[in-house]
Amino acid sequence: MSEMLGLRGLTKAYNRGKPGEVAVLRGATLSVAAGEVVALVAPSGAGKSTLLHIAGLLDTPDAGVVEIGGAAMGGLGDRARTEARRRDVGFIYQFHHLLPEFTALENVVLPQLANGTPRRAAEARARDLLERVGVGARAGHRPAALSGGEQQRVAFCRALANGPRLLLADEPTGNLDPGTSDQVFGVLMDLVRHTGLSALIATHNLDLAARMDRVVRLEAGRVV
Ligand SMILES: Nc1ncnc2c1ncn2[C@@H]1O[C@H](COP(=O)(O)OP(=O)(O)OP(=O)(O)O)[C@@H](O)[C@H]1O
């Protein structure tokens, strides 16, 4: 099977060369195949957010290689990185991070407009995605008027708005109560499977991890 995400020998330290240096990644290597959904399990502070940010081109490693769809990302300039991120990567955070002054629909439309999609097509796609995750009827509401589970469903739609090839999620249901988390996670998995996306999903929840294709652990800065 072809590889969608390749992380090879990543190292990353904060406060590098200073007294407070924290070596977070120490040669982390990981591969996600096309269509594969991988769970990333790590104790708190082990560096999973750092790893996801590097994989999602939001941060750069000190050393090592990031490949998306077989293309090395290391040599890209800022502009090409931003383009690759917008086009290829969808990101979901623990907290929804929706724009509070915009409706659910607009939150899913805006990244498409930024990517050059005409408004009419962007709205049609946004409505379709919101319907698929069961919040179509709430499309005209702002995030504050939605429940936590609904907000997170909208955030899933936003992450998928530009049709990424790779989905990265950092505790996507970590902010929800256990019952809602379970249900909303099911919605996310349906969406991912339906789209044939590759995904790397960080979670502390071993039951959720067991519902993915493969589980990897981040320990002492390496993937085991
Ligand atoms: N900007 C920074 N400057 C200094 N240290 C940092 C910075 N960002 C993260 N760290 C440290 O690096 C380590 C890994 O952080 P990271 O956020 O990647 O962990 P995590 O596994 O996602 O943790 P959690 O599950 O608690 O969110 C932590 O010890 C953290 O304190």
Image (cartoon, rainbow, N blue to C red):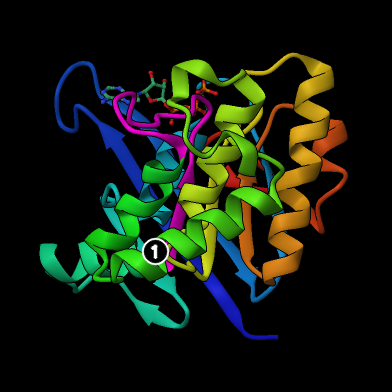
Residue 94, compared with residue 54, is above or below; it is above
Q: Crowding near pointer 1: few (<14 within 10 Å), some, many (20+)?
A: many
Please indicate, yes or no, whether residue 174 appears anywhere in the rendered image. no
Foreground of the two, 183 or 104: 104
Up/down of 144 relative to 107, above or below: above
Is 147 magenta? The answer is: no
Quadrant location, ligand no. 1: top left
- Residue 89, above or below 25: below
**Vertically, is 18 above or below 91?**
above
| Overall secondary structure of the magenta section | loop
**To which residue does mark 1 refer?**
122
The residue at 49%/56% (across/down) is 126
Write the start and end of the magenta stretch as one range: 88-104
Which secondary structure, mark 1?
helix
Q: Tell me where residue 76 appears, x and y as whole percent.
A: 18, 72
Identify the residue at horizontal 86%, vertical 47% (top origin). 211
Residue 196 percent location from the top left of the image:
69, 72
